[in-house]
Image: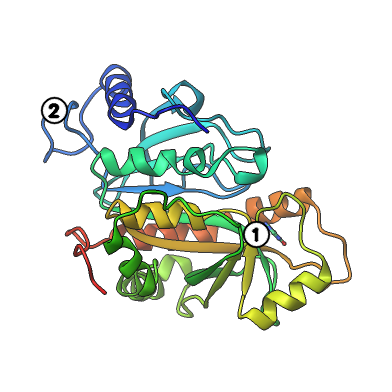
Amino acid sequence: MTERFDVQAACRWIRDQWRELAHELPSDGQQDWSEFGPDVGVVLGSGIQFPADGWTEYCRVAVGDIPGMPSPSVAGHGGEWILGEVGGSTILLLGGRVHLYEGYDVEEVVRGIRILAALGARGLILTNAAGGVREGWSPGEVVAIEDHINLQGVTPKVGIDVSSVIRQQTGLFDRDWIDRTERCYRNDSDAGATDGFPRGNYAGLPGPTYETPAEVRMLRKLGADLVGMSTIQEAMVAVDCRLRVQGFSLVTNLAAGMSGQPLSHEEVMETGRRSRGRLLRIVDAAISTLDPDPPPVNPG
Ligand code: HPA
């Protein structure tokens, strides 16, 4: 059982830090730090958590200093929240993701998302490093998550309100936003991106061990295209908190048994570093196509 978490106290602490550390307000629409919230939050997966070119950074806070926030223990999940701006949108980069396999419980895993929503954000872009389960993908592929299979054995839906259950039946990931993102990305001539990106189903497992080859065969039969150890709990809470959500997996390796090579965390990190450019271009396209309105209460 975790201690009670005061999301408003965390928001006040963060805004006080921003007031002190950033010299001017990022957006002219907002007059006062005490009300300020970013438009969109971005969670970056293993090895990919540095701001991209063209992002203006305002300030950073160490995630472990935020009241109630757990600190990451896994290499590659840098421990800072970075407030910045890109293309006129204010963004909060949520570094320092924690995972169930680090021993945190589900409520700790999703706290950052609750804070993001309480700060007033409208959208969340989740990214992760994943194993490619679908045949034909290579490391470096970026895949939009269309739907998920929760094999983590937990959900954050304790004391739920029923409308969120209805929403989940329609899928968590915002298809219209994915479509707009893809159109925008295709038109990004700098990225030479006329091809768009594939879409797939993400299977979330508890970890921390990678899957066995037999488990990967099972996952393929279940309809999974990607496998990883994060994202699902965060997406569920985000939808409950009325954030629009998108998720992108960077395929850092072929899932176990598909390449004849053993998997390693170093390989995951290295592919993350090498391929982050494409992912961050897609994230930019997602940021610039976020709907200005919050999602309807019950789109189902
Ligand atoms: N399996 C689970 N999680 C992962 C993998 C994988 O193959 N690659 C990166 N994260």
Q: Which residue is the extreme one toward the top?
A: 20
Q: Quadrant of residue 186?
A: bottom left
- Asked if residue 132 lies left or right of residue 249, the reply is right
- Asked if residue 236 lies left or right of residue 177, the reply is right
Please state, as top left, top right, bottom left or bottom right, where the C terminus lies in the image. bottom left
Residue 81: x and y in percent read 44, 34
Name which residue lies at 88% across and 65% down. 261
In this view of the protein, can residue 294 be seen by the observer? yes
Question: Which of marks 2 and 1 precedes in the sequence?
Answer: 2
- Asked if residue 187 lies left or right of residue 269, the reply is left
- Asked if residue 74 lies left or right of residue 190, the reply is right
Residue 100: x and y in percent read 61, 45
Residue 34: x and y in percent read 18, 26
Q: Secondary structure at mark 2?
A: loop
Q: Is residue 46 above or below residue 13?
A: below
Q: Amino acid at mark 2?
A: Asp
Q: Is mark 2 within 8 Å of ligand 1?
A: no
Q: Is mark 1 within 8 Å of ligand 1?
A: yes
Residue 113: x and y in percent read 39, 44
**Chosen colour scheme:** rainbow
Q: Amino acid at mark 1?
A: Leu
In this view of the protein, can residue 289 be seen by the observer? no
Q: Residues within 10 Å of mark 1 (few under 14, many from 20)?
A: many
Name which residue lies at 50% across and 37% down. 108
Q: Quadrant of residue 289?
A: bottom left
Q: Nearer the viewer, mark 1 or mark 2?
A: 1
Name which residue lies at 67% across and 44% down. 101
What's the mark number on residue 32? 2
Q: CA distance from mark 1 to mark 2?
A: 42 Å
Q: Is residue 20 above or below residue 97?
A: above
Q: Is residue 5 above or below residue 94?
A: above
